[in-house]
Image (spheres, rainbow, N blue to C red):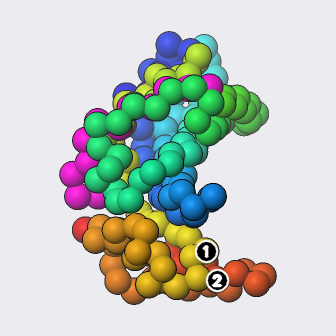
């Protein structure tokens, strides 16, 4: 269920990706939730759009550590993008609430609330990516059991980006 300014929209899809990094010797992930919603007519306008939430979380060593957690305050960024009869409108929030209720295989059940957004969704976990220098170093800090062993590796500048896809 998606409500923006108390107007209900039907969800098209919701996916989750994790960006992993080490900062000041702490595990830090950014849980990125991308959700799109179907067009509907409101006040004779066709309205559709997308929501992107980036939630920065410390101390996570595996995906299951996210289950039954709540985060509130300036914990990242939520961007609501609405196409209102061909004109894009964007709102961004840094102060918001997230509750991650349940994780079952690749499905993450969660809610996100801002001043104008109330969203309950089940996002499908797609991938984890990192610029960790090697799989061995990453495995010492983060459990990759939810992901396939073979990453896609891309060189960007001087860094190698490792992208691990979630197992079904």
Outermost residue toward the left in this view: 104
Q: Residues within 10 Å of mark 1 (few under 14, many from 20)?
A: some
Q: Residue at x 56, y 45 (%)?
A: 56
Q: Is residue 114 left or right of residue 138?
A: right
Magenta part of the chain: 95-106
Q: Residue at x 58, y 35 (%)?
A: 75
Report which quarter residue 119 is drawn in: top left
- Decide if residue 144 is in sight here: yes
Q: Residue at x 59, y 16 (%)?
A: 115
Q: Is residue 136 left or right of residue 54?
A: left
- Residue at image mark 1: 131
Going from N to C along the chain, the mark reached first, 2 or 1, is 1
Q: Majority secondary structure of the magenta segment?
A: strand
Report which quarter residue 54 is drawn in: top right
Give coordinates of residue 3: x percent, y percent.
Answer: 47, 22
Q: Nearer the viewer, residue 35 or 144?
A: 144
Give coordinates of residue 35: x percent, y percent.
Answer: 49, 44
Give coordinates of residue 122: x percent, y percent.
Answer: 33, 42
Q: Is residue 21 left or right of residue 93?
A: left
Q: Is residue 116 above or below residue 137?
A: above
CB atoms of marks 2 and 1 within 8 Å: yes
Q: Residues within 10 Å of mark 2 (few under 14, many from 20)?
A: some
Identify the disc placed on residue 160.
2
- Report if residue 104 lies within the magenta region: yes
Give coordinates of residue 9: x percent, y percent.
Answer: 45, 27
- Decide if residue 167 is in sight here: no
């Amino acid at each position: 269920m998606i409500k923006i300014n108390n107007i209900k929209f039907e969800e098209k899809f919701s996916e989750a990706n994790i960006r992993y990094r080490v900062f000041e010797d702490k595990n830090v992930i950014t849980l990125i939730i991308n959700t799109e919603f179907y067009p509907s007519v409101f006040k004779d306008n066709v309205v559709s759009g997308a929501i992107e939430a980036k939630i920065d979380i410390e101390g996570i060593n595996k995906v299951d550590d996210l289950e039954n957690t709540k985060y509130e305050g300036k914990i990242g960024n939520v961007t609501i993008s609405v196409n209102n009869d061909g004109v894009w409108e964007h709102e961004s929030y840094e102060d918001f609430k997230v509750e991650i209720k349940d994780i079952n295989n690749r499905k993450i059940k969660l809610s996100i609330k801002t001043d104008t957004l109330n969203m309950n969704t089940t996002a499908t976990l797609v991938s984890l990516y990192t610029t960790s220098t090697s799989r061995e170093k990453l495995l010492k800090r983060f459990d990759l059991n939810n992901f396939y062993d073979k990453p896609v590796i891309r060189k960007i500048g001087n860094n190698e980006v490792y992208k691990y896809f979630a197992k079904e």
